[in-house]
Amino acid sequence: MSSRRSGSTSTWLVLGLGFFFLYAPILSLIIYSFNENRLVTVWSGFSIKWYGELFRDQQMMKAAWISLQLAFYTAWASVVLGTMAAMVMTRFRSFRGKTLFGGLITAPLVMPEVITGLSMLLMFIALRGLLGIELPLGMTTIWIAHVTFCMAFVAVVISSRLSELDKSLEEAAMDLGAGPVKVFFVITLPIITPALLSGWLLAFTLSLDDLVISSFVTGPSSTTLPMKVFSSVRMGVSPKINALATLLIAVVSTVGVIGWYLMARAERKRARDLQLAANQ
Amino acid sequence: MASVDADAAGSNGTMVNSAANPPAPSPDRYLVIDTVRKEFDGFVAVDDVSLTIRKGEIFALLGASGCGKSTLLRCLAGFETPTAGRIELEGQSLIGLPPYERRINMMFQSYALFPHMTVEQNIAFGLKQDGMAKAAMRARVDEMLSLVQMNRFAKRKPHQLSGGQQQRVALARSLAKSPKMLLLDEPMGALDKKLRSQMQLELVNIIEKLGVTCVMVTHDQEEAMTMAHRIAIMEQGRIRQCAKPDEIYEQPNCRYTAGFIGSVNLFEGRIDKDEKDFVTIRTSAFPDPIYVAHGVTGFEGMEVAMALRPEKLRISKHEPDLKHNKAHGSIEDIAYFGSHSVYHVRLDGGCKVMCNFVNMKRWDSESFTWNDPVWVSWGDLEGVVLSS
Amino acid sequence: MSANWQSLRSRLPGSRWAVISVPYLWLLLFFAIPFLIALKISFAKFEMAMPPYSSLLNWEDGFLVLKLRLENYLYLVNDSLYVNAYLSSLKIAVIATGLCLLIGYPMAYVISRMEPATRNIALMLVVLPSWTSFLIRIYAWIGILKQNGLLNNFLLNIGLIDAPLKILYTPAAVYIGIVYAYLPFMVLPLYSNLVKLDRRLLEAAYDLGARPWRAFLAITLPLSKAGIIAGSMLVLIPVVGEFVIPEMLGGPDTLMIGRVLWQEFFNNRDWPVASAVAIVMLIILIVPILIFHKSQAKELEGRLA
């Protein structure tokens, strides 16, 4: 087709420049994590000593452990709450207050973090004053804050899968006598499993990544990894951070590639099955 | 043996247009498609197709899905570039011209109306691309709107229209630029059956009124028969037969066309006696040879098929007073259509034939029922002998 | 929605309401009510106490007195720092959104026109960086943009400049950081919109005589309006309140309201003023948030009807 032919050079130009912009900073981080020199941008030889320093940094390791735990618990809670919210948005007939519900589930996607963080802290403090509920600032409050904004992202991921899903499958199951709860667990849930998985991973990384909201609602004893990184970056650039970044990137891209491979394989298998079915 | 239309030689046809000495453009050679071939990654979608289309003609490309008809149409529109071959409109080559430089417009399958534009904006779109002056454009849009009787809906968006109305807008849009040729891609595909027959006639009336040359693609034989002056039947990228609708029906040139258009009883056999003014064909279906009251190009012992349309067969309770072409059997299945019934008769030889019976009188259909012993028979000139 | 669903649901109101109420209450308690509390505290007065603000309700001479102090808001209006910070944040957000659109639209367009297999790889490559830490990706730019950083070294080496450019700690660095961090948020909604575009509409436009560029302007661009709006809001709204990027890449004079709020809260410990800053920001952003919500709701419930 004519449009495709004329587009091929500019296609690669646009994508090449775009991806260069997206990946050059990451590549520079990785390369200089193996730099022997303390000055991050002067190359003086290959070394993995910064990785050693990173692992010997007790505070950093403690912060990483706290963040990983938080991210893990946040991911589970966000998937449960986010799935419920997605079901409400895409499958439930409207009820009084659905508009407000829709607003509450989409607003966290864009709400500036400083506003969310400050308001939540004020709420935790007020909860103590008004109801006498003692919520010590720390892991629990960070977890609540993270679940609140992560569930919104999970809800979007799952809603878009649910709205693509052919509703007649669920209706067929009901027609055959399964109740709504059973239909959800036996039909809907297995089909949206890939979306649940990507929602889980999304919530995990969002929680692992959050600096601003955590900074507001944390207590004196709970320093998360981003908070630790932020304070050490403020002191000055350190190759240790490059080493940490490289490790994070390695983990994320491995998970990403595996996830992509699994999904591509499932897709191919489905295409092949369809082909077979069509040929018979 | 059926002859192939002189100016429509398919790749497997008998006549080949002399490509070496192309004749001057004439109304008879308005659009010339000459050995056009289109391959996709080694798959041949269009296999050396040659066609000539007259000025003002409505021409249908008919075939099952995947037969290459749509690809050929897209080559005419300019969305695909043929791998080889010539396409000429009024003597000028279209090869290499992008769609926006061809004076050919297309009515797309399910119309492709621009959803964000009103009916008049849709119709004016093509005129705007030509930089037509505002006033002239206004007038032309109004003219097109009245042509398709859609003036009342000028300000509506496509999704506010019914299927039939959308089709009228699509037609008006593709005719607004007075194209040299109009392409229709499955024009009735998005309409329900009742609306279809009404719109078919309406569409033909408008096209004939404007005298625009039209190539349409369809998989619906009824649509092709009703609308087109000539039909080309395509299969696996080739043209099997190209002729007028009645010729295609009454004189198919091969087993494929005979089976594709309408229903048919096909009997395989060999030529038994080959005389100047008659032949007989021996088949396994009937005890006696079939008698055909005209000569054919062939030889004794040649493998042929006898094609008999169900409505050419007569069904009767008593043995008809004929010398040839009759057989005894019993009714196995009955399909009742109201206007007529189709009886599936199991002949004594074991073969099953379809036989139409027009229900001329009320309750006529009750004269035959399952397992009734019956006779089927046909006239000496009603069958077609097929060699390919 | 089918009658089937409804009749079964009405028979089982328990599970229906449980599914609605758990996320609903969570969001009300932890997302909606906090704003009301922030609103309340923005009317209070700073006090050296814990929590560091006065209460609004007091008993005075046997009366319950509700004191709503507007002084925090008056303070915001009268001190040019705050007004300037709001204006500068809006300016930066609008320009950065425009830049994201300029870079993101061609990328999304090109990806949406690829073969499905390559398309998925390209899309994954767009998303992948945003799965690694935001903070660390911003940090990477310090090494690139600083005085003796990679960019200056490169430009000096190829002889394009004679002296290193000052990019880090300038607005330019802030723009680079924002565009870099938020580009995927622009590309994704644009892509999912463009990939749904019916290609026959473009063919119809070509067929009617439109050259590719005009067909793009007349068909593709207007039909991708929803994607443009969603992507722009997804960038614009959070960027207005952005803290990390101006803090790390901007100079001390890069004024953004998120940074001001942070300092008000953490450095000055003036919670009432910080709350007032947040409430005013929220009021400024309410229209964009509503626009975003509308486009999002359409996306989520589009196929429900």
Image (cartoon, coloured by chain):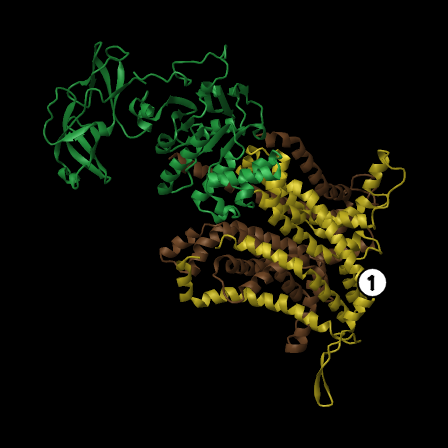
Chain colours: A brown, B green, C yellow
Q: Position of residue A142 (x, y in %)?
A: 67, 63
Q: Position of residue B381 (x, y in %)?
A: 22, 20
Closer to us: A138 or B58: B58
On-image quarter of the N terminus of chain C: bottom left
Closer to us: B62 or C44: B62
Q: Is residue C113 left or right of residue A180?
A: right
Task: Label 1, secondary structure: give it.
Answer: helix
**Number of other residues with Cα within 10 Å of mark 1, as a class: few under 14, some 14 to 19, many 20 or more:** some
Q: Which of the 4 image quarters holds residue A278?
A: top left
- Whether residue A13 is visible: yes
Judge whether A144 appears above or below A197 on screen. Answer: below
Q: Is residue B207 left or right of residue C213?
A: left
Q: Is residue B274 left or right of residue A269?
A: left
Look at label 1 and name its amino acid: Leu
Q: How many marks?
A: 1
Residue at numbered disc 1: C81
Q: Is residue B242 left or right of residue A31?
A: left
Chain ID, mark 1: C
Judge whether B207 appears above or below C18 on screen. Answer: above
Closer to us: B18 or A146: B18
Judge whether A194 appears above or below C3 on screen. Answer: above
Closer to us: C182 or C74: C74
Task: Please report the residue visible at 44 percent of the width from the left and 22 percent of the height from the top.
Answer: B54
Q: Which of the 4 image quarters holds residue A24?
A: top right
Q: Residue furthest bottom?
A: C62
Q: Position of residue B223 (x, y in %)?
A: 37, 33
- Whether residue C180 is visible: no
Task: Please report the residue visible at 66 percent of the width from the left and 68 percent of the height from the top.
Answer: C34
